[in-house]
């Protein structure tokens, strides 16, 4: 089996394209809008998009389809247990699409797909023990242990955004309190910046206050200001990094990974975010990992879900003789 159709199934759009076993995208993906009004409409729309993609990429002869979507996914059974942005509850998506398309269909959680993609073709190439955090509106996680994605007993493993970093802290969308997601996500960055509004030293000229009043205080705006050296925005990014670091200390202590990959929109902050996070690990994690574990930005960006979805069909990286992934 040499080529698979990788599909990133999102709440606003579905992207599908041919991928080979090295994680190379062989053509620009077909992108179509998701129809999330209800379960039946969504599934009919997904089937149609997959048919169009298989038709468009017929020249590559894809032998199977890999789907990645947000939410709790029972990859073993091909069932979406629940999803924050898709109208699916205990839906056997893989079996339904297999029946419709008469092709093998594999289903995976999007963050699990991303860690697989980064390991085969991205920032963690050649490593076997990899943890990835995806920082955006929320915080996602994927865990690769000894070369295999770890799913847990029911497919719910890897929810690193919901580890508690502050007992009795802010209420999270999951119902818990003090989850990492509340302190190391895009909305948290905005909150840290907004805290300096009215402080003439940290917000000279009232730039943050002005953006806030006009409804323009976004994560991107804070990132841009930090890049330009604005003191309050710079401090907000550092604070985000320190909280991320608190999470990474636990990740390092629990998994002893060789490398931690940080992706998602917020990771565009680069070293301004990663350096304070790495410092936390160097100071507070257990040896020997604290000196050794690498903390690096993701490389594949938005294509990680699609590429990883395809790679899920093969299940695990193709290890070379020296224990590294064959290119
Ligand atoms: Zn939570």
Image (spheres, rainbow, N blue to C red):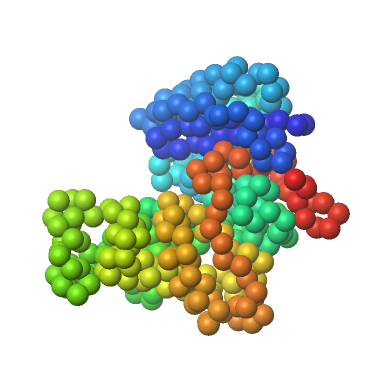
Of 227 and 313, nearer the camera is: 227
Q: Is residue 64 left or right of residue 214?
A: right
Q: Is residue 241 above or below residue 24?
A: below
Left or right relative to 78: residue 33: left
Q: Quadrant of residue 152?
A: bottom right
| Residue 156 seen | no
Image location (x, y in percent) of residue 230 = 27, 65
* Residue located at (61% from left, 40% from top): 307
Give left or right: position of 49 versus 220.
Answer: right
Give the residue at x 67% y 41%: 23
Q: Nearer the viewer, residue 74 or 127?
A: 127
Query: Horizontal and vertical percent for residue 127?
Result: 70, 59
Depth check: 120 or 42 in front? 120
Residue pictured at 54% horizontal, 76% vertical: 281
Q: Residue at the location (49% across, 77% down)?
A: 280
Asked if one can make out residue 49 in the rendered structure from this viewpoint, the answer is yes
Res 83 → quadrant: top left
Quadrant location of the C terminus in the rendered image: top right
Q: Position of residue 255 (x, y in %)?
A: 63, 69
């Amino acid at each position: 089996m040499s080529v698979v159709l990788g599909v990133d199934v999102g709440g606003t759009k579905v992207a599908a394209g041919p991928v080979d076993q090295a994680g190379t995208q062989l053509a620009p993906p077909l992108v179509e809008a998701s129809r999330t009004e209800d379960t039946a409409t969504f599934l009919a729309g997904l089937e149609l998009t997959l048919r169009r993609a298989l038709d468009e990429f017929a020249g590559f002869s894809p032998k199977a389809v890999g789907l990645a979507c947000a939410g709790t996914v029972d990859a073993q059974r091909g069932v979406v247990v629940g999803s924050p942005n898709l109208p699916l509850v205990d839906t056997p998506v893989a079996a339904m699409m297999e029946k419709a398309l008469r092709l093998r269909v594999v289903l995976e959680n999007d963050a699990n797909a991303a860690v697989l993609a980064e390991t085969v073709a991205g920032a963690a190439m050649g490593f076997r023990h990899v943890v990835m955090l995806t920082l955006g509106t929320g915080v996602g996680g994927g865990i690769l242990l000894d070369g295999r994605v770890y799913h847990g007993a029911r497919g719910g493993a890897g929810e690193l955004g919901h580890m508690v970093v502050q007992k009795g802290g802010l209420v999270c969308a999951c119902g818990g309190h003090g989850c990492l997601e509340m302190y190391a996500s895009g909305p948290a960055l905005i909150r840290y910046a907004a805290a300096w509004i009215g402080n003439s030293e940290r917000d000279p000229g009232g730039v943050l206050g002005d953006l806030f009043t006009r409804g323009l205080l976004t994560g991107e705006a804070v990132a841009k200001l930090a890049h330009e050296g604005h003191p309050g925005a710079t401090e907000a990014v550092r604070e985000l990094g320190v909280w991320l670091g608190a999470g990474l200390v636990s990740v390092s202590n629990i998994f002893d990974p060789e490398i931690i990959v940080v992706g998602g929109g917020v990771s565009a902050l680069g070293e301004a975010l990663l350096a304070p996070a790495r410092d936390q690990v160097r100071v507070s994690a257990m040896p020997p990992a604290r000196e050794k574990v690498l903390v690096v930005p993701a490389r594949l960006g938005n294509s990680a879900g699609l590429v990883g979805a395809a790679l899920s069909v093969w299940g695990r990286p193709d290890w070379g003789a020296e224990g590294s992934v064959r290119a």
